[in-house]
Image (tube, helix red, strand yellow):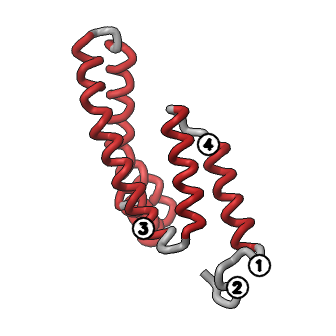
Amino acid sequence: MPGPLATQVAMRVGYLRRGALAVAVAAAFVAPSFLLVVVVGAVYTRYSGLSIVASLFYGIAPAVMAIITLAAINLLKLTDRRDPRPWTISAAVFALTAATGSEPILVIFGAGLLMIAIDAHPRLHPHPWRLP
């Protein structure tokens, strides 16, 4: 996830170098992406009824989904490793998201709490003598 990491590093370095002026660093780093999303959203809202815009977004959607899927797989490899419990929970949340076509934030939040509860209980942890 280089985007969020780069943003956080830029903000932290800005804070360490210039203190309160880090807000300016954060704004300069985030503003181009934010403006691009706002412009695309405004164009879509204004011209969504036109067939050319619908076709354009219909073609862009699979590419965006592929980028998100690749980022999710890389994140899963970094975080879940070989433990089947988080893979199972991640797969269940993914399946629910794909089936409903929406982002069930309460389910995602609940999955995080479930994993915390499982890891906090010594009998459910695969190696209770080792910390993860």
Q: Position of residue 28 (x, y in %)?
A: 36, 50
- Which numbered disc, 3 or 4, marks the residue that appears first in the sequence? 3
- Which residue lies under the disc numbered 2? 128
Q: Is residue 70 left or right of residue 51?
A: right
Q: Position of residue 22 (x, y in %)?
A: 45, 59
Q: Residue at x 31, y 45 (%)?
A: 66
- Which residue lies under the disc numbered 4? 105
Task: Answer whether labels 2 and 1 touch (C-beta < 8 Å).
Answer: yes
Task: Answer whether labels 2 and 4 touch (C-beta < 8 Å).
Answer: no
Quarter of the picture containing the N terminus is: bottom left
Q: CA distance from mark 3 to mark 4?
A: 22 Å
Q: CA distance from mark 2 to mark 4?
A: 30 Å
Q: Amino acid at mark 2?
A: Pro
- Which residue lies under the disc numbered 1? 123
Can residue 18 be seen here? The reply is no
- Which residue lies under the disc numbered 3? 77
